[in-house]
Image: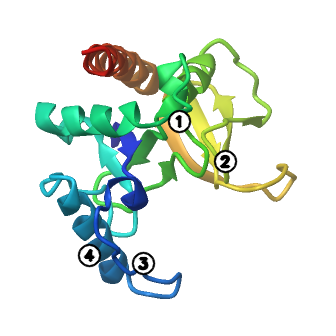
Amino acid sequence: MHIINTLEFAPYDYAKENHKSPIYDDTDEDWYIYWKRCMHDSGLSYLEPIQKRSWLVNIDTISNTDFRILAEVKKSDKDLGEELEKEFYGGIVIIPENEEIKLTTSCCGDLSNLEEWENIFTDTNQKWQMLWIGHPYPYYRHNEDYIEFSEQMEGDVDENTKVNLTVSKIWLEKEIKKLRLKQDKFIKQIEELLNS
C-alpha cells in the first residue's frame, strides 16, 4: 500500500503556446500528451502525473527547479491568499500494491485537506463520516483496528454503501504524520521562494 501527497499542475497555468485540449472522450494518452506539452512550455518536462489522465504529481518527485517554476506561477496569481495550503490544489492519494488508485483527492481538494485526514484519529465513530478531499468524496468509519473507506461519491451514504478500501489504523496514522512533516517542509520552501 502506498500513500502519497500530490500537487495539481493544471495545464492552462503552465502552457505558453495555444495547445488544443483533448475532449472528454479522447484517450488517456491524448490527455497525457497535451499535459506534457503544456508542462514542457514552462520547463517542467520531467514532471510525471500519477496516472495518464491526471494533473496530479507526487510531491516527492518535484525538484527544486520545479518548485521555483511553481513559485513563479503562483507569484503571478493576484488572488494569492495568506493560507498557502489552500492555494495549492492536490492532496492525498492511496494506491494499493499493484492496483489502480483506490482513493484520491479530487475537484476542489487542496493541501489543507490533510487536516481532514488527521481528524480521522480523533473521531472513533463506527458510523460513516464524510472525508472532505474535494468532490466526489469518500466516507470513512472505524472498524476495530482498521479504517474503512467507501467509494467516492456526491451525496450521502445509505444501507447499500460498500467498503472500497480497508487500511490499518496504525499504518495510516503513521503515514499521515510523515506526510504532515513533508507538507510543512514544502510550504516553508514555497513561502521562501514567494518572498525572494
Q: Residue at x 34, y 16 (%)?
A: 191
* Mark 1 vs mark 3: in front: 3
| Marked residue nearer the N-terminal end (2 or 3) | 3
Is the image coloured rainbow, by chain, by secondary structure, or in one colour? rainbow
| Marked residue nearer the N-terminal end (4 or 3) | 3
- Number of other residues with Cα within 10 Å of mark 1, as a class: few under 14, some 14 to 19, many 20 or more: many
| Marked residue nearer the N-terminal end (1 or 3) | 3
Residue 12 seen by the camera: yes
According to the picture, the residue beneath numbered tag 1 turns out to be: 110
Instruction: Give the percent coordinates (x, y) of residue 106.
Output: 56, 50
* Mark 2 vs mark 1: in front: 1
According to the picture, the residue beneath numbered tag 4 turns out to be: 33
Measure the C-alpha gap from mark 2 to mark 3: 26 Å
Number of labels in the image equals: 4
Q: Secondary structure at mark 2?
A: loop
Measure the C-alpha gap from mark 4 to mark 3: 10 Å
- Kind of residue sitting beneath label 3: Ser
- Number of other residues with Cα within 10 Å of mark 2, as a class: few under 14, some 14 to 19, many 20 or more: many
According to the picture, the residue beneath numbered tag 2 turns out to be: 137
Instruction: Give the percent coordinates (x, y) of residue 76.
Output: 40, 37
Q: Secondary structure at mark 4?
A: helix
**Quarter placement of the N terminus:** top left
18 vs 182, nearest the viewer? 18
The vertical placement of 196 against 80, above or below, is above
- Kind of residue sitting beneath label 1: Asp
According to the picture, the residue beneath numbered tag 3 turns out to be: 21
Instruction: Give the percent coordinates (x, y) of residue 60.
Output: 22, 35
- Residue 71 position by quadrant: top left
- Kind of residue sitting beneath label 4: Ile
Q: Residue at x 53, y 36 (%)?
A: 110
